[in-house]
Image (cartoon, rainbow, N blue to C red):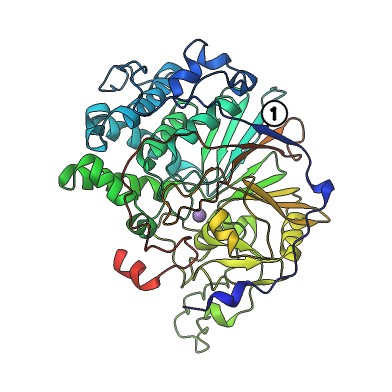
Amino acid sequence: MPSQSDVTESSPQTTPESAVIDVAVSQPPPSSSFDDLFSTASLASVSSSSLSDDNRKPSPSPDPSQSRPQIPITWPSDGVLTLDWVTNLMSTFDWSSRNLRPTELPTVLPVEVFDILVLTASKILHKEPNCVSIEPDRDGMVGSSVVVVGDVHGQLHDVLFLLKDGGLPSENKFFVFNGDYVDRGAWGLETFLLLLAWKVFLPQRVFLLRGNHESKYCTSVYGFEKEVLAKYGDKREGKHVYRKCLGCFEGLPLASIIAGRVYTAHGGIFRKIPATPSKRAKGKKNRKVILNPESVPLSLGSLEELSKARRSVLDPPWEGQNLIPGDVLWSDPSMKPGLSPNKERGIGLLWGPDCTEDFLKKFNLKLIIRSHEGPDAREKRPGLGGMDEGYTIDHVVESGKLITLFSAPDYPQFQATEERYKNKGAYIVLESPNFDAPVFHSFEAIMPRPKVNPYYDFENVIDSDEELDLMMMVEAS
Ligand SMILES: [Mn+2]
């Protein structure tokens, strides 16, 4: 693998004051449970301001005051999910994460209910295009908003807070999640399933994009596979649950375009794939040479090429012809101009401000919102901003901006040293009518987290997933 020094050669990052459009800092109440947040109010009408008062006392976990929900969860007899069903799923997962052992999750969500939820969601997700087009003010609707969310990495309680703080998805409240639902945090399964429930309930309002962790390789290294096997057993049932999750990951769309102005994806932009040689017509002598992608200079791909990529792969390949999914999921911005292979990660690209400008201009966009880099990754990238507030503005160019958004506060959940990053998470709200002036909401982690054991060897697995171990990936696939 390449040396660590490859990505550090970049000019100091500048973030002009004017680049920060608006910032609203949300404080989670010290109260730690979902039910506490909503015990007296109707779920749909709670405003974020009511969440900001902090009169409540921190409650230790497990929290005996949380009333025991009705378990097991059952699928509605008419097969139609309701707001009540989805919010009940959220509070039930919150309760079970605090009051039950992980091995007891099947008593909360029987595998039969898991199956229907994942199958129903997968059917919707697999039909979506690679790049979903979101038109929030369509159909005579005005005053919509779109909440964009970055990496959440199994931090269930922070996701529950974010959903309440941002306001639950609804007719005029869209959500776009930029991927990395699982791994590292201890509740990746519950987190992913509750997002699937929202997708099934409001398929035209909630959009779930794929992250690089929604893959066989990452989940086998960073905890999600072991988490599932711990919760559903390492025999037939657990393996079945893990396999079904991987199948669902394969179907997740790769990117979104909001109101024709904002491009979002987990990693970022992607390359043009050199034309595949056409099959030689019979009898013709001048057979086309098969192009080695590495011998062709890198250039930016188009949205049309993105729409044609084959995304249903367990692990996006880092070689061959199908490179667009790996680029979209794994790439990182750089302060150094141009497009180059992302040697640090072993897959994807590094792209400079000039490429951000080209991409925005070519497709008439104002913003790129990508995720993929937490405080640990940014610590090793001196040219770019730190992730203390949950977001950075990386490129400010003539046509617009490039933003990195990270929504897992106090990340990672398990850390080898006492010294934590104590980063905030953030989400972005895009408002009608233009949806191109991001309002940033930073928030702190919900504490204390229930005590659980990690599902991966966090002391020895590298801090960040910057280095894709190709040998392990081959073994894992
Ligand atoms: Mn990532």
Residue 340 in picture, x, y percent from top left: 62, 73
Placement of 242 over or under 200, stated as above or below: below
Placement of 218 over or under 343, stated as above or below: above
Q: Secondary structure at mark 1?
A: loop
Placement of 30 over or under 9, stated as above or below: above
View extreme (front): residue: 418
Q: Quadrant of the C terminus?
A: bottom left
Left or right for 76, reference 172: left
Q: Is residue 361 visible to us here?
A: yes
Q: Nearer the viewer, residue 167 or 297?
A: 167
Residue 235 in picture, x, y percent from top left: 15, 47
Residue 137 in picture, x, y percent from top left: 69, 28
Identify which residue is drawn at 52% across, 27% down. 30
Circle 1 is placed at which residue position? Answer: 137
Residue 237 in picture, x, y percent from top left: 19, 42
Looking at the rendered structure, the kind of residue marked 1 is Asp
Left or right for 93, reference 437: left
